[in-house]
Image (cartoon, rainbow, N blue to C red):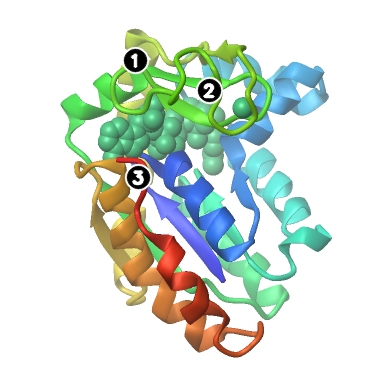
Amino acid sequence: MRVILLGPPGAGKGTQAAWIRDRFSIPQLSTGDMLRAAVANGTEVGRQAKAIMEAGKLVSDDVINAIVAERIDQPDCAGGFILDGFPRTTDQAEALDRMLAERDLRIDAVIEFQVDQAALVERISGRYACANCGAGYHDTFKKPKVPGVCDVCGSTEFVRRKDDNAETVAARLEAYDAQTAPLLPYYRQRGNLHTVDGMAPIGEVTAAIAAVLEPLATETASGPAGGSAEKAGSSGAGNA
Ligand code: ADP
Ligand code: ADP
Ligand code: ZN
């Protein structure tokens, strides 16, 4: 299963990618996470990307395309992957098409998250993550079950992104409208664009995505017969 998650910053892509990853056992390829790791590690890419990310602008297509091309050749991507935050420009979408064609692969679904602008700002301002395992949380919409303790790994350390502030958010939303939104007609034309209501509670968005992906998984299943039917019962949208 190969899936693209398309939507503005704060739309819920990372949140839903975690569910898709666990459900279908495929890695989440977040170009934002990869760039943040590069910045933290002080690599050449990180040095180039840091200021651009802090300004809420897009890192150059060449850099991003190279990162993704290398990543999808890793062994853990053999059974599929989730693209979260890539492609973000027409150039990146075309580069992805070439990468896939060279490898004789195709995208099974592009999922578009529709969310109101005002909600995006609220979501981004309240976003934080576990410093240890990366699990995502929100001050209002997704609190850990035990306050101050990560649901997934039990860590008590959390981090907020430097670019999740009001000024940078405005630039990021502008970049989305100008450079990424044109990808919607690009994929709609190919007939594999599925739109979900990203304003719904987290569990409902998960259910809508499950309704798109579960039938595709049975079609392309390579696992044991009945595997997806068996798991369908536990795909319930839990954590709204
Ligand atoms: P993206 O990856 O698209 O930038 P995230 O998945 O990080 O977005 O979500 C942004 C913030 O909004 C996070 O704090 C997350 O917990 C919260 N969030 C995600 N989906 C929803 C939703 N459907 N309703 C309310 N809050 C949500
Ligand atoms: P969000 O989903 O909240 O916008 P990301 O974590 O996807 O955040 O991206 C954070 C920043 O990393 C972006 O603002 C941009 O500077 C850079 N970035 C991530 N993915 C890409 C990409 N595909 N092309 C260009 N820049 C990117
Ligand atoms: Zn954790």
Q: Of all residues shown, which one is farthest toward the front?
A: 146
Find numbered disc 3 in the image and state the secondary structure of the residue it sits on.
loop
Q: Quadrant of residue 227?
A: bottom right
Q: Which residue is mark 1?
A: 125
Does ligand 1 reach within 8 Å of label 1's beta carbon? no
| Nearer-the-camera pick, 218 or 194 | 218
Q: Earlier in the sequence, mark 3 or mark 2?
A: 3
Q: Disc 1, disc 2: CB below 8 Å?
A: no
Image coordinates of residue 85 in percent, x first then y, are: 50, 43
* 71 lies above or below 52: below
Q: Which residue is mark 2?
A: 129
Image coordinates of residue 146 in percent, x first then y, are: 46, 20
* 36 lies above or below 19: above
For the residues carrying marks 3 and 2, which lies nearer the camera in this image?
Answer: 2
Kindly identify the amino acid type of the residue bearing the numbered disc 2. Answer: Ala
Q: Is 109 on the left-hand or right-hand side of 95? A: left
Q: Which residue is mark 3?
A: 7
Find numbered disc 1 in the image and state the secondary structure of the residue it sits on.
helix
